Image (tube, rainbow, N blue to C red):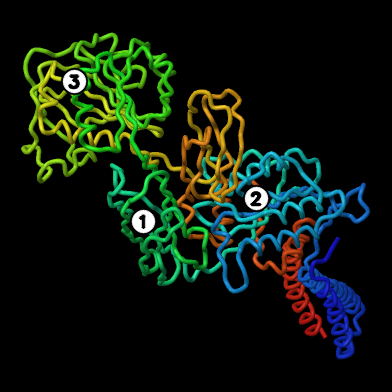
Amino acid sequence: MTFLNPAYLFGLFAAALPVIIHFLNLRKLKTIEFSTLKFLKEIQKTKVRNLKIKQWLLLAIRVLIIIFIVLAFSRPTIKRFNILGSNGFSKTSAVIIIDNSISMSAKDPKGNAFNEAKDFAVNLLKYFQNGDEVLALPTSLENDNGLNSFTNVKSAEVELEKMRVSFISYDLSTSFKKAIDILKTSSNANKEIYILSDLQKGKFFNEKISLKDFSKLNIKVFLVDFKKEIKRNLSAVDFAINNQILEKNILLNYTSQIQNGKSDLANGIASLFINMEKISQVSVNLSSGEKREVNQEYLLNRSGLIESTFELEDDDLDLDNKRYHSIYIPDKISVLCVADEPESVKYIKLVLASASENIMFEIMNPKLISSKNLSLYDLIVLVGNPKMSSAELRKVIPPNKSLMIFPAYNSAKNEFDQVLAAFDLGRSMPINSESFVEFEKLEMQHPILNNLFEGNKIKNVESPQIRKYVRINPANSLQSVISLQDNYPFLLEKKTNQNKIFLFSISPDLSNSDFPLKGIFAPLILKSVYYLANQNKSLQKYFPGDEISFELPQDVEYLDIIKPDGVEEHIKNDSMKMFKYKNTDLIGCYKFYANKKLINFVDVNIDSTECNYSYFTLSEAVKYLQKKNVLATIIPIQNKANADFVITQARLGSELWKYLIVVALLLLLLEMLIARNSKKEISIVTKND
């Protein structure tokens, strides 16, 4: 047995007090003279003998009451013995989970939360001995392959030293479940999990992950809170370019969203950088819990990759102060038109040639499409079917290329259906040639139609008269931009994470309509080219740790990857058409090159939910875990300086003070009953006298 408060054992000397008081009372007792009658004398002797027995019994009970109370205050525990060990402790297997999310970078004059958690973890290692198994596990689970088994104390200390705050953000239940899986492999008697975290609500425990399958492991979970009081912090939670059509010499309009989570009234400077050059800055002031949008502009006077950065000045939590958004403006837009007859696209050629010197237009016979490197073009225009099946079309046309698709004036239904099937656009129906139809509905807020007509009013649109067109039953992923009077689409759009597709229902010549002669034709075609050729990668959001995947152009042997910190990676392509990249541990723009040509770029930003700085208290966290049926002994460490006491107590076993108090109370009740009866007997004896 071990006593956690051994100093209280000196109180056992108090057990002598009832004995001393008893003997003092004996001196004060008066001698009772009995009657001369013999039988009365014998009765009195018997009663006195019984009374003395009860008094000695009361004395023993009173001594025991004091002993049990003193023992309860000294907090005895039953020690677990290990036959193989010399110190009486069972061997221990422990996983130390350190929250290294960005919220742990919060700082105050004493330092940041993460460094304090690391120092605490290093001190924890002092409570482990030779033969114990220890593993330090970050919540980001970086270097996951090397964190699948236990190490010794020395190796755990090395791992702790290497840990850094990470932009990769998982909730605690992910690393908690991994810790359980590792503990299942251990045969040691003591199994422990230490969670060192700021207990951020949004990143605490995921209810979808089951944590009910480890009750037989008898795991002890120690919770330690490292939250900081954030007095001044603004977070950048969103950053976007509002322009849908991008070209040189236009005014880019940026909208950023700033949030003041739970801090006091905060002010700061918000800056816009273009390719690392500061363009503008504004002052912002937000009260606690407030969100605000900031608008900034930049005259786009350059081409190539435009890396835009929105940045807030330093505060109590710096890692949530930046967001990134990149676009690509080609120096010249290369448009390839694949058509059987060049005459069918002459009007498109005239529009593009007369409108801008930045557009290069090339017409190619469908027979040559397989031999052409289509990755060199920004936009591909398909007129009709280049005599290929849907599978052949998918193989030839790069998946990241935007398309503008027209049926040819003489397209056969089955041929055009091959084009539709190749890009999952739906299917065609019998061609309508019964009567003229005109425009019925235009989505005037679409980028190619917005501000194209005075007042954005449909009545100002000069509709073509369409004699013959392909009725299209579109797939669910398509959006109607312009529809006809019979509710069939004239222009459809499909957006994917890699490209955009425009699908027209008529040919771009005069064979089936007067569309090329109408005033809407030239601006619609021109704006469509700019819109489709635009590489504004805003359709899919990537967070740190996400996998970036995209299809590669043909004949790519090596890829060069430039990470946001400037570090370059040279990767060989093992004949894979789909390239996958997982090393996204930083925020910023990742650039992918093949043969020194930029083939893709991806912006990685922090998850805005990480900026929700709402926290559990230790008691709330314990109740939350109990409510979620986490079947383990959950032990909060309220006082970090007293952690060794709490850990030792948990390892040594169950405390006995509760049981000792119960025994002391029962003895007290028994003492009261015996004492009451004894008083009655004393009074009877006295009366008989």
Residue 475 seen in render: yes
Q: Nearer the viewer, residue 290 or 448?
A: 448
What residue do we see at 17% from left, 39% from top?
Answer: 444
* Front of the two marks 1 and 2: 1
For disc 1, the marked residue is 256
Q: Secondary structure at mark 2?
A: strand
What residue do we see at 18% from left, 30% from top?
Answer: 482
Q: Measured along the vertical axis of the image, is residue 514 above or below residue 74?
A: above
For disc 2, the marked residue is 138
Q: Measured along the vertical axis of the image, is residue 467 above or below residue 572?
A: above
Q: Nearer the viewer, residue 79 or 552?
A: 552
Q: Amino acid at mark 2?
A: Pro
In three-dimensional space, the C-alpha distance between marks 1 and 2, rounded to whole angstroms, equals: 31 Å
Q: Quadrant of the C terminus?
A: bottom right
Q: Residues within 10 Å of mark 2 (few under 14, many from 20)?
A: many
Q: Residues within 10 Å of mark 1 (few under 14, many from 20)?
A: many
Contact (Cβ within 8 Å) of mark 2 with mark 3: no
For disc 3, the marked residue is 506
Q: Between disc 2 and disc 3, whose residue precedes?
A: 2
Q: Secondary structure at mark 1?
A: strand
